[in-house]
Image (spheres, coloured by chain):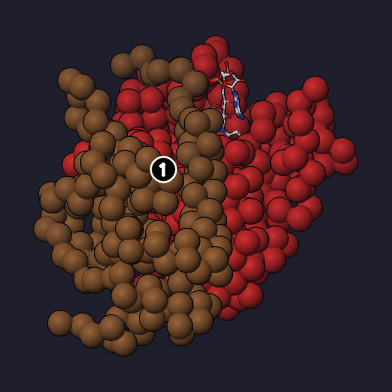
């Protein structure tokens, strides 16, 4: 069992939290725990309450869109040191996609209700968290927009 | 009298193709083939990584195609061709024993010799891996003269990965890092899904000591260069291959000219800094 101080130092090593002061790390540690999932497990499913967010410490997760009558479409894959999930920060706090483990996954899980409470009572923490999440969201949005160009699409199909 | 640059054989006219025989055909993807060619008299073909040839499908037409083979194997001239129109279609229909016309090699290729001592980041997208392959062979043949070697490859789907066997082989090496990402995939694909720029964000190299070779669709190259610059790589050390359409390949006709630059003669590989405005010029 990891105590809160150990958890704060684990969190401090994560790129996403780089530069946060020690007291903020302690605060975050109060909402965090280590979790583990097996390959194939769903971390969350579309429509469920978004009550946790994750930083992947090991492994790979496929964020999927369920399409009736077809195999799920992988929209994005996330791996070590990346953030999984931001629906916990945007009302009505519901997951928009499924998140399925491609491999064994070890992650830091943060209790969203706990974190939202701390962000609301401490504006500095709230600002820092939002600033970091907005950066991730903007990178992902940019990636999605570039993919919309379908830049590798073939011009014409070959005749066999 | 001119000298045919690839074969060191005197030729009357640099516009005149030599006849090569198709000795091997590999269907890489449903719309992409690799042709192994041999000069009928068994002459070796010398070239630099990143150079291209003008390939002539008799009675159909002539197109520029990069050489995708190994500079250390000059007996085998290798090209990888995607079908987009009538000439490339004609190449896809060839059989072993058929002949095609070849003139070249042309252009300025990847500066593999000038970047020794650096970390090397090779970023390919789609068919862009084909012109990069000779540079990869060359870097790996001289592996001790480079720092970290990173190959990042993006494709549309897992079914569109070019040179898949070779990707596995390179990935199995301990002296390079290879990462692949696709735009879209169905559940069950164990690799990454996203844009190739995401791989740049996480790759291990020293930005101040890095040279990058980038080839793929222009949109992909634009964002890849941006991601490299965001990591701190100086864009004068980033090289891109501009495969804009051309005609004579000798800097005569002006078909591939922009400003004072001819893609065929001064490229296709350019230091990004020298042609950055071309990437940002908008269509009217
Ligand atoms: C230096 C250089 C190296 C190249 N290397 C390769 C290679 O290794 N493998 C390969 O498959 N192709 C390569 N190309 C592209 C290839 O030359 C073209 O696909 C070919 O000329 C198309 O001829 P076509 O008669 O089959 O099609 P066309 O009928 O001429 O064209 C069919 C469609 O493709 C588009 N198109 C044609 N040429 C280009 C181009 N250069 N860029 C973008 N769109 C184009 C046309 O606008 C049209 O929409 C290279 C081009 C250059 C300039």
Q: In the rendered image, which quarter contains the C terminus of chain A?
A: top left
- Foreground residue among B37 and B194: B194
Residue under mark 1: which chain is it in?
A
Residue at (18% x, 20% y) in the render: A69
Which residue, as the protein is rendered here, is positioned at the far front? Answer: A121
Residue B9 at what x, y percent from top left?
A: 62, 45
- Whether disc 1's CB lies below 8 Å from ligand 1 is answered no
- The brown chain is A
The quadrant where residue B182 appears: top left
Q: Is residue B196 left or right of residue A112?
A: right
Tell me which residue sits at (70%, 26%) in the image.
B247
The N terminus of chain A: image quadrant: bottom left
Q: Secondary structure at mark 1?
A: loop
Residue B96 appears anywhere in the view: yes
Label 1: few (<14), some (14–19) or many (≥20) C-alpha neighbours in 10 Å: few
Q: Is residue A159 above or below residue A70?
A: above
> Looking at this view, is A66 or A71 the one in front?
A66
Q: At 36% across and 50% down in the image, what residue appears?
A: A88
Q: Is B112 situated above or below B273?
A: below
Q: Position of residue A40 (x, y in %)?
A: 13, 49
> What residue is at 75 percent from the left and 40 percent from the top?
B280
Tell me where residue A159 appears, x and y as whole percent. 36, 14
Q: Quick check: A2 left or right of B137?
A: left
> From the viewer's perspective, is residue A126 above or below residue A25?
above
> In terms of image quarters, where does ligand 1 lie?
top right
Q: Is residue B90 left or right of residue B220?
A: left
- Residue to which mark 1 is pinned: A91
- Residue B100 picture location, percent across and down: 49, 26
Q: Which chain is red in the rendering? A: B
Q: Is residue A54 visible?
A: no
């Amino acid at each position: 069992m990891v105590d809160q101080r150990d958890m704060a130092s684990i969190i401090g090593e994560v790129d996403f939290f780089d530069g946060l002061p020690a007291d903020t790390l302690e605060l975050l540690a109060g909402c965090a725990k280590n979790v583990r999932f097996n390959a194939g497990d769903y971390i969350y499913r579309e429509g469920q309450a978004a009550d946790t967010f994750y930083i992947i410490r090991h492994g790979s997760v496929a964020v999927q869109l369920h399409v009736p009558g077809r195999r799920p479409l992988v929209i994005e894959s996330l791996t070590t040191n990346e953030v999984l999930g931001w629906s916990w920060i945007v009302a009505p706090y519901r997951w928009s996609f499924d998140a399925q483990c491609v491999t064994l996954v070890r992650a830091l899980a943060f209790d969203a209700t706990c974190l939202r409470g701390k962000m609301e009572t401490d504006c500095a923490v709230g600002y820092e968290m939002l600033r970091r999440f907005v950066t991730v969201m903007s990178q992902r949005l940019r990636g999605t927009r570039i993919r919309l160009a379908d830049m590798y699409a073939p011009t014409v199909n070959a005749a066999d | 009298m001119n000298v045919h640059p690839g074969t060191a054989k005197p030729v009357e006219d640099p516009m005149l193709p030599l006849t090569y025989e198709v000795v091997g055909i590999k269907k890489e993807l449903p719309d992409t083939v690799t042709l192994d060619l041999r000069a009928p008299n068994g002459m070796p073909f010398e070239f630099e990584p990143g150079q291209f040839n003008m390939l002539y499908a008799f009675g159909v037409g002539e197109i520029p195609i990069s050489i995708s083979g190994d500079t250390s194997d000059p007996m085998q001239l290798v090209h990888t061709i995607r079908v987009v129109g009538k000439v490339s279609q004609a190449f896809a229909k060839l059989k072993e024993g058929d002949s095609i016309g070849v003139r070249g090699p042309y252009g300025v290729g990847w500066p593999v010799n000038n970047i020794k001592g650096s970390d090397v980041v090779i970023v390919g997208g789609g068919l862009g891996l084909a012109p990069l392959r000779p540079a990869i062979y060359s870097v790996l043949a001289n592996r001790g003269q480079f720092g970290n070697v990173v190959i990042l490859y993006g494709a549309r789907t897992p079914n569109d990965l070019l040179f898949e066997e070779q990707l596995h082989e390179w990935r199995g090496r301990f002296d390079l890092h290879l990462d692949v990402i696709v735009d879209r995939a169905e559940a069950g694909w164990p690799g990454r899904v996203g844009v190739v720029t995401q791989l740049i964000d996480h790759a291990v190299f020293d930005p101040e000591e890095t040279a990058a070779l980038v080839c793929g669709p222009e949109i992909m190259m634009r964002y890849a260069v941006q991601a490299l610059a965001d990591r701190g790589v100086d864009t004068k050390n980033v090289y891109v291959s501009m495969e804009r359409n051309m005609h004579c390949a000798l800097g005569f006709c002006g078909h591939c000219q922009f400003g004072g630059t001819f893609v065929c003669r001064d490229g296709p590989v350019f230091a990004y800094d020298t042609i950055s405005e071309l990437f940002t010029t908008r269509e009217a």
